[in-house]
Image (tube, helix red, strand yellow):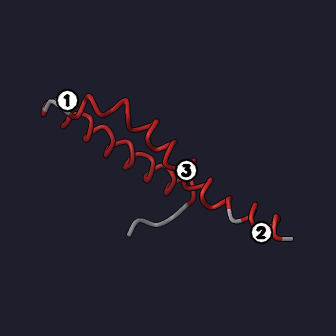
Amino acid sequence: MEDFFNNVSRYPRYFITFTLGVLYTAISPLMPLLKRPSTAIATVAMLVSGFVFLAFTLRAMLGLDAL
Protein backbone atom coordinates (compact mmCIF):
# COMPACT_ATOMS: atom_id res chain seq x y z
CA MET A 1 0.00 0.00 0.00
CA GLU A 2 2.93 2.32 0.64
CA ASP A 3 4.10 1.85 -2.96
CA PHE A 4 0.65 2.84 -4.19
CA PHE A 5 0.69 6.16 -2.34
CA ASN A 6 4.27 6.74 -3.40
CA ASN A 7 3.27 6.34 -7.06
CA VAL A 8 0.17 8.49 -6.67
CA SER A 9 2.21 11.27 -5.06
CA ARG A 10 4.38 11.44 -8.20
CA TYR A 11 1.51 12.45 -10.49
CA PRO A 12 1.28 16.13 -9.43
CA ARG A 13 5.03 16.54 -9.96
CA TYR A 14 4.72 14.90 -13.38
CA PHE A 15 1.80 17.18 -14.31
CA ILE A 16 3.72 20.32 -13.31
CA THR A 17 6.82 19.18 -15.19
CA PHE A 18 4.80 18.30 -18.28
CA THR A 19 2.97 21.65 -18.24
CA LEU A 20 6.18 23.64 -17.85
CA GLY A 21 7.77 21.68 -20.69
CA VAL A 22 4.86 22.41 -23.02
CA LEU A 23 4.95 26.11 -22.14
CA TYR A 24 8.72 26.29 -22.64
CA THR A 25 8.43 24.55 -26.01
CA ALA A 26 5.69 26.96 -27.10
CA ILE A 27 7.47 30.11 -25.92
CA SER A 28 11.09 29.38 -26.88
CA PRO A 29 10.64 30.05 -30.64
CA LEU A 30 9.13 33.46 -29.81
CA MET A 31 12.00 34.65 -27.63
CA PRO A 32 14.26 35.82 -30.51
CA LEU A 33 11.37 37.90 -31.84
CA LEU A 34 11.18 39.84 -28.57
CA LYS A 35 14.74 41.14 -28.81
CA ARG A 36 13.99 43.90 -31.33
CA PRO A 37 11.27 46.45 -30.48
CA SER A 38 9.57 46.33 -33.87
CA THR A 39 9.17 42.55 -33.89
CA ALA A 40 8.30 42.56 -30.18
CA ILE A 41 5.37 44.90 -30.77
CA ALA A 42 4.17 42.82 -33.71
CA THR A 43 4.52 39.56 -31.77
CA VAL A 44 2.63 40.86 -28.74
CA ALA A 45 -0.07 42.35 -30.98
CA MET A 46 -0.50 39.02 -32.79
CA LEU A 47 -0.74 37.10 -29.50
CA VAL A 48 -3.29 39.50 -28.04
CA SER A 49 -5.38 39.52 -31.23
CA GLY A 50 -5.26 35.70 -31.30
CA PHE A 51 -6.57 35.48 -27.74
CA VAL A 52 -9.29 38.05 -28.46
CA PHE A 53 -10.33 36.15 -31.58
CA LEU A 54 -10.46 32.91 -29.61
CA ALA A 55 -12.51 34.53 -26.84
CA PHE A 56 -15.03 36.02 -29.29
CA THR A 57 -15.29 32.75 -31.20
CA LEU A 58 -15.91 30.69 -28.05
CA ARG A 59 -18.36 33.25 -26.74
CA ALA A 60 -20.34 33.10 -29.99
CA MET A 61 -20.22 29.30 -30.16
CA LEU A 62 -21.41 28.93 -26.56
CA GLY A 63 -24.10 31.59 -26.88
CA LEU A 64 -22.79 33.72 -24.04
CA ASP A 65 -23.85 37.35 -23.76
CA ALA A 66 -21.19 40.05 -23.87
CA LEU A 67 -20.68 41.77 -20.55
The residue singled out by tag 2 in the image is 5
The residue singled out by tag 1 in the image is 39
Q: Residue 17, labelled with which disc?
A: 3
For the residue pair 45 and 36, the one nearer the viewer reads as 36
Q: Quadrant of the C terminus?
A: bottom left
The three-letter code of the residue at mark 1 reads Thr
Give the CA distance from mark 2 to mark 3: 19 Å
Most extreme residue toward the right is 1
The three-letter code of the residue at mark 3 reads Thr
The three-letter code of the residue at mark 2 reads Phe
Residue 65 horizontal/vertical position (percent):
46, 66
Residue 17 horizontal/vertical position (percent):
55, 50
Numbered disc 2: secondary structure: helix
Crowd around label 3: few <14 · some 14–19 · many ≥20 (10 Å): few
Q: Name the residue: 37% across, 29% down.
A: 29
Front label number (1 vs 3): 3
Q: Is residue 30 left or right of residue 62?
A: left
Numbered disc 1: secondary structure: helix
Most extreme residue toward the front is 2
Numbered disc 3: secondary structure: helix
Give the CA distance from mark 1 to mark 3: 30 Å
Q: Earlier in the sequence, mark 2 or mark 3?
A: 2
Q: Earlier in the sequence, mark 2 or mark 1?
A: 2
Give the CA distance from mark 2 to mark 1: 49 Å
